[in-house]
Amino acid sequence: MVFEKILGHLLNRMKQFYRAITKIGKIALLIVLALFSFSCASTRSMMIEIPVKAKSELPENIQSLLLISRVYNDSYTDLETDSLQKLFYQQRFNYDTVIHDMRAIDTMLKALGELLFESGRYDFVIPENRFQPTGNSVAMAGEMPTGEIKDWCETYKTDAVLSLDFFKTRVITEYDELVNFDQESNSFYDFSHAEMKVSYEALFRVYNAEEEGVIYRKILLDTILWDASDRATSALFSHFTPVKDALAETGIAIALDVSAEISPAWRTEYRKYFAAGDENLKLTTALVDSNQWETAIAQWKNLAETTGKKSVKSKAEFNVAVGYEMTGDIDAAIQWGLKSFETMFRIQTYEYLEILKNRKNELQNLQP
C-alpha cells in the first residue's frame, strides 16, 4: 500500500508537470522533446509476452489432461486423400454427405494437445487407445462414470480427462461452369467454380476424478468455407483444397477454439532498458539477451550503489525495475522504478511506472 500511495503522489506530480509544459513556449517544448529523444537513444528494446486469463479457466489443480475421443464406432473410416476425393468427383463435385473421418479426430486431438502445452498451462497425454467405441454414430456419448474417470487418470497420471463426446461433420460441395464478361477485351469467357462447406458439431467435456464429474463442457457449431475459380477445371482442382485436408483443417479449427477457451492467451508488449551512458550498462546487455536476469539485477544494483553520477544511478535503478518485472516480482519492480524516478526525473520512468501499476492490477485480477 505504501508503494501505491507514493506512486499515486508521483503520478499526480507528473500530471501537474504536463499541465505546466503546455504553458511553455514552443522553443522550450522543442528542447524538452530533444532531450527526451536523446534519452531514448540510450535504450534498447526487447519483446515480451504477457499471459491473458483464459475465458473458461479450469481449476488450478488441473495441470495435466488426458485427451481421448468417445465418438468412435464402426462407421468411422480413414480413406486416403485420393480415394475420398474420387467419391466426390464421381458426383461431379456436387455432393452433400456426412463423413465420419478418423484422421480428422486424430488431427484435432494432436493439435489440441500441442496448443494446450504451448500455452504453458497444461501437460497432456494422448494414449494409443484414444479412440474409445460408443456404438452409436448419431447420439452423443453419455457422461463418463466416476470409476472410469479415476481409472484413466490413475493409469496415465493425469489430473483430468478431456473427452470429445460428440462429433459430426457434413461436407457439401458444389461445382459450376460459368460465363463471365471481360470489359477490357470486350468478350465473354468460360470459367469453373468450386465451393466446399464443412459444417461441424462437437461436444467436449472435461472430467475431474476428484470432483467426480464434469467440470467443463463446450459445444461447437460452425461451418468452414472454401471456394475458388479458374479458367479450366483441371487447373481449378490442382490447387483446390482436397476434402481430406478440409476435414483435417476443420479438426485444427476446433482445437484452436477449445484451447482458446481453457488456455491463457499471450499478448506481445515491448520493454526498454538502458544500455548506454556507462560501460557497465553496455556489458549487461549480453546478460539480458541470454535471460540471466538475476545476474543482471545484481550488477545493476552494484552500479547504482557505486556510481557517482545521478544519471547513471537512475538508469541502473530503472534497469533493476525491469529485471524484477521479468522475474515476476512486480512490487520490487515498482519499488525500484520509484527509486529511479526520485533519483532523476525521466518521462520514460513515469510511463514505465504506469505500466507496472496496470500490470499489478492485471495480476491481481488473475488470482482465483
Image: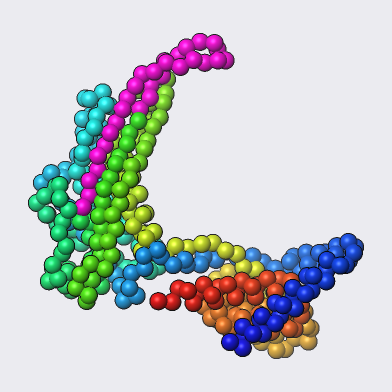
- The residue positioned 40% from the left and 29% from the top of the image is 228
Q: Main secondary structure of the magenta part?
A: strand
Is 155 positioned to the left or the right of 43 in the image? left
Is 97 positioned to the left or the right of 6 in the image? left
Please state the horizontal and vertical placement of residue 332, each as a whole percent of the image: 58, 84
In this rendered view, identify the residue nearer to me: 92 or 306: 92
Q: Is residue 103 above or below residue 290?
A: above
Please state the horizontal and vertical placement of residue 99, each as a whole percent of the image: 21, 40
Q: Find out whether residue 178 is within the magenta segment.
A: yes
- The residue positioned 79% from the left and 74% from the top of the image is 17
Q: Find out whether residue 45 is within the magenta segment.
A: no
Tell me which segment is drawn in magenta. Answer: 166-194
Please state the horizontal and vertical placement of residue 167, each as a whole percent of the image: 22, 49
Q: Tell me, yes or no, if residue 109 can be seen here.
A: no
Q: Tell me, yes or no, if residue 15 can be seen here.
A: yes
Please state the horizontal and vertical placement of residue 298, each as a whole percent of the image: 60, 84
